[in-house]
Amino acid sequence: MSGLAVEHLYRYDGPSALVDRDGGSLLRLATSGGSEEHPRFFAGRLRQPRRTAELLRALLRVVQSRWHIPPAMLARIIAQADPVVTCDDASIRFEGVSGCAGAYARVDLLDGALDGETFSRGTTNVDFGPAMAAALAKVRDRDEVDLAVGADAVELARGGETVVERKVPLPVRWLKSFCEVAAIARRLEPVHDVAGIEARRWIRALPKTPAKRPAWVVAAGRGLRLAHREPRGGGVRVAGLSRLRVLEPIVHHARRVRLYGDPATGACAVVLDLQDARFELVLSPEVWRGLSGEGQALEALARREAIAGLLPKVHAALRWEGMIDPAELGRRAGGVDAGDAGDALAALAARGLVGWDLTGGGWFHRELPFDLSLVEKLQPRLKAARKLVTDGKVTLGESGGAGGDDAPVTATVAGSGVEHRVRLGADGARCTCPWFAKHRGDRGPCKHVLATQLLAGGDGDGEEETGA
Amino acid sequence: MSEASSKRLTELVEAADVDGIVAHVTGLSEPERRALAPAAIAAWKKHRRHDWIEVKKGTFKRDERELAAPIALPAVCTLAELRRLGLDALPGPDTTAKLIADRRPPWVAELVEELLEGGGRRWGAWAIVWELLSGGLIDEPPIQHDGWVAGLVYGFGRSVCGPRLARDRGALADELAEHLELLEPTIWRLFEVEGGGEESLAAHDKYSAKDWTWIEGLATLAERGRLDRSRLIDASLDALERDFAAFRAGWFGRFHERLAPTLDERAERAPRYIDLLASGVKTTVSFALKALEALAKGKRLDGAAFVAGVFPALRAEAKGTVKKALAMLARVAKTEKTLKLEVARAAAPGLSHEAVDVQENALELLEKLGDPADPETAEVVDEMAEHVAASLRKRLAAWRGSGAGGDHGAGGGAPAEPADPAGAVDAGHLRARTASLPEDLVAAAGIPALLDRLDAGELGIERAPFAGHAVPRLDPDATLAPITEVDELIDVAAAALETPEESADDAERVLDALSRLARERPDDLGKRAGPLRKRAQQLLDRHQFGEPFRGHTLTADVAGVVIAWVDRAWPRVAKKEPSKQTAARTLMELLGQRSRAVAARLIAGEAAPLLSAPTHRGGFIAAPSLVERVAALDAAKREADPTDAALALLRLAPDRREAALASAAKLAGELGRAVRYALGGRRGKIGPLAALWCSAARARVPGGDDPTVSATHDGLGPDGARAARYTPAIRARKSGRYTFRWLELAREPSPPAKSDPFAAAPMLHRAGFEDERDAPGGWSIASYRWASLAWPLGREAWAALGAVALAHNLDWGGAEWENRVYLEHLVAPDADLGPMAALLLALGLAAKEPGESGLATDIAIAAIEDGRADGETLGAAMAFLVPTGIVLFARWAKTLAEVARVSPLHAWVIQDAIERALPDDAKESPRDRAALVELLRELAIDAERAITRPGARAFLESLRGSSKAARAARATLAAEGDGAERGRAAMLAALQGRVERAERWARWRGDAG
């Protein structure tokens, strides 16, 4: 692992391929990692092969796109990251994050889109590169196309496939985005719901030149239009409009299109509803901001101390549900209160163990097949906050956090040549550092606030937690 | 021995003896080579930079040691060492290959792999691999490696043929022919590897002479029988099926056509062309259609297969593509009569296209070939019906009706109704709400005129002009709470420093607080404000924000006053104090002048109210607050800062002036008199401070002349004692093929040569075009926003500057992002749309930059809702611009269509505006008339409102012939009806908006029942 990236080994049992078979073709997706080395999840027929191929290609376009190249990220690093597939009790979900870490896309293939057999459930990586995209471009609706996510050992032996190995440095920024996107998506609220044809017209009318400033999507008649100032209500803020263009090749498939927004963070999402499939696109608040930098998961990570005892139980009670009912989950976890189960899910999301489904408005079980034990340590703000506590640079004010629930907690945090003043009150947190002045909490707490929270919350030793 | 050898190598490098180095490292044993590695690496590190040597005074030549330094590396370094140095460190391809051939290390294959992996310098790396291949160090071309394949595109020319000058080498085909045996497998792989950046066939051919393009090269080899022509045709189709990026995919389409497939060859591949209609690449779809068209012309197209596969082409964005697909469907139906119904079914999705003419073509096919009773067709058509253009809805409904016996059920082609029909507005209820509102506000909102028209059964919507003092401006929700505590001050100042673009109001609050709290310096101020002080200095040291108090940026001024507060000393930038005060020429300089005064008071420890601190967002000061501040100043027996005092009067809100005037009776001195005068007090003695009295005049009669002040101070120019009046003109200058146009505003009275450094309003009227564009001053959007708060009631002057700025950059010749700020002020729901604001809006609607035109669209939508804009206002501004040639009708058509589709009210006003904007004769308008005429046609037909304005009819009648515009004009002229139903709905919607606005004002004023 370098300071910027975590080495990840993709080890496939053969390359993914679209191969001819018995008058039709087979879309064979090779798997790597997860619960087994090469899990086998599904085999069956695609009911609308061309449409599914286009959705997967759109997902790949997101994964391979870099709408912004962070200075510290080498351009070629992330081009090799593969999407992740989850087979749960209701769907097959393909997910990926863009190379710049500012966009997340997911294709959900629901019951009606597939006709086949589910062998097991879980999450894995699928080999899915440009060659696969080129092969998918040739799929036509008249074709009979089978889909196999993973293959059984006999099949592989017969095919004589050679193992495909790729060691890829996955940038921390990218990994964190995958983890934090659930926290961001959970905050999003539905704002617009329009017919597919109207959405198509709106997407086509987007400015062709990259827009410098954010815009707001507002209703216009029965369709949508872009507003260039914040509307009095009912708008979805979108920055980096060019990122929406990835929807152009697939929006005509959509029956309905829903837009989600979060006025506080400025993140947004578009969901194409295809009746038996969905395409979900979540965008960061600015094109140069990754979903990883939003800090929405930081408090959940910091809060883990409070619910640490629950996490293993709640985690163990997950059953690859397509939509998790926290109350039911709590019951299964041995009588955990639904609210606490919800908090535990938020903390598990920050570790990549569950995702958020915008359409269902709930969590789904998905365990990212990466080594994420380091993610918490790789949260630079949380790491810096712990160091501040460890180094004794945080001094709580007189109340020391013991002045009752409503009393504000104040602290001074020693910085470079200055002392920052932190106040944690019922109206939120405040700090005198420039970072807080700039973002006012909409990108999560600053390291000084986090450090004060850690100290006031009793995690004063600054020890880093190991393991879930 | 090894030491001597190393020393010798170093000497050879210092002597730049390339041949000597090669000789020195050739034929050595591996241990001998390794012993030389440290010296070789050290020499390379020493000379790797591109140094230039001055050989005689003023003459430089490249340091040849830089070329000699890397020579030994491939002969002595391990692969790991080369990796560390970067493979870019390797010398030229031939030298590298020669030395590697001599050394024959075991890692040649690895080196090849890594050379081809590297980006950026791939053609150079490719050349090394080529040399290794030619020298027999590798057995065969690494064709499995994409880097090798993509590298061939440039690498061949640069390395294989590179040593020869272009004039000495043959065409690409000739050069390729010499190496074809070795290269042919790689050539076939070119159709599988997309490449990127420079390394693609498309990029190469774009910048190459024709005989050196790969298209010509490969096609020529095919003509000579050296490459399999049939395989090339197929390979190009294979590549197109891979959906490469449009730019790169285009090459394969062009290459395919360069091979000129015969009709037989095309017919053989017809299914593949049909499949390509589903390509995600627009140019590929267009290519496939052309190929199929050729087959159709040659009567070799399988109609049934085409009809079955054409659907993807009908959902294309490019209307030319869809129209061509529809035309081919028509051709198929003509030749294969049995397919009529299938063709109609296939054409139906064309109705969903955005372009009306495409929809019309699809409808024509339906009418001609379709069966409305066919359930499959009907399902598609019914789904599209509500999205079809107004001008086609009746036709579509008629067609559907004909098949369904006149009863086609819900949604069956019925004309689309607006999503939010204003007809639902209850007129009686609105009247009742109006009755409970104060009369002056009802009048200011333009309600009586609208009610009169409704009562009389007349159609028409006129804007409510509410300039001056007619309406309240102080929204209680927009109150700026004064900062009262040091910690809050630190917070707000920090936010202003970090987010200046959103902090103009906060900057004012900070200045106000510092001015008032100058003496409140807690003992631990240095500690508490330490982070803020540190940050302020950091920002000043960056220089990009300029100097404090010079009118450069908001950031510099806020940072400057923060430092003055904490240190009680002038801020220092680059160890220097701020430059001396100069007379302000721009609004930002004027604000800087005021910041400097605040800083001076902070350093002196003198607290005083900041007279000009806004009490509300947008720059307004509530009149009673100003009176209190002046009274406090009187009580402290302090003189007012002249800049501050003049600015304060200019910011007076129209609200609560009578009460303020009553409490201002005892204010002392010239300032006290000026305040009373500004608030509408009796005319009395006018004092000597010109800026102060001119501000008082502008506050008293914002849009009119003040003869009393004018009698004493008439020299400040427009918006001094007399209001500015504008005569706009578009000027043009030809330069070669280009004509540059700009807006010139003649002002009355004329601007003086030198402006008063304390008078903000006249600063908006600088003499001379360039000066005028620089009137706000400052270096950033944040500065423009801050400057724009100087005179909240003077929006016409601000809009006039904006019109000049936008007109100058309508086609976005330069990135003038700050121009957007001029438009932003028209967003405010009570910003009046005077002639200059309307002109700015009309220009904004025609702007090329999407941010500007989009914002203008938002403003037009809001202004129509608010009753600020009507067809007359907007139409007049447009009519002025139409004959000047500065605007494009197509841009207006796009933005106005966006506005019109919001509601029937918007559609009504926009139709009105377009009718008024059209000149009597089409010759006096831009040539791209069709789009605007088509929009007018859709609006007129949708509202069932015939064009009645004689000028507009004359314009439409003057469009003759068969052009698109002429056809649209005829259809527009044929529109019938008086628009009564839609007009009444629009008027009720307008009434609703106005009642809501009056109710809002009443709430603000505390008059709400």
Image (tube, coloured by chain):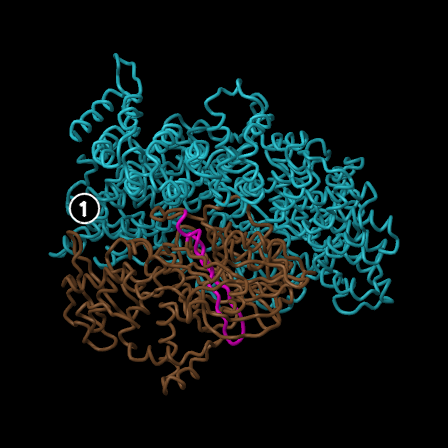
In the rendered image, the vertical position of residue B750 relative to residue A330, given as above or below: above
Q: Residue B42: image x %, image y %?
A: 21, 32
Residue A7 locus on image (x, y percent): 34, 57
Chain letter behind tag 1? B
Relative horizontal placement of residue A52, taking residue B791 as reference (left or right): right
> Which colour is chain A painted?
brown
Residue under label 1: B602
Residue A98 on the magenta segment = yes
Viewer-side residue, B517 vs A178: A178
Residue beneath the point at 58% across and 49% down? B869
Please report the bounds of the magenta region as a residue range: A76-100
Q: Is residue B419 left or right of residue A311?
A: right
Q: Is residue B370 visible?
A: yes
Residue farthest top in this picture: B56
Residue B628 versus residue B211: which sits nearer the camera? B211
Residue A220 at least partly seen = no
Residue B212 is one of the magenta-drawn residues: no
Q: Amino acid at mark 1?
A: Leu
Toward which corner of the image does residue B180 lie, by quadrant? top right
Callout count: 1
Residue B325's place in the image compared with A236, above or below, is above
Q: Which chain is cyan?
A: B
Nearer the observer, B147 or A251: B147
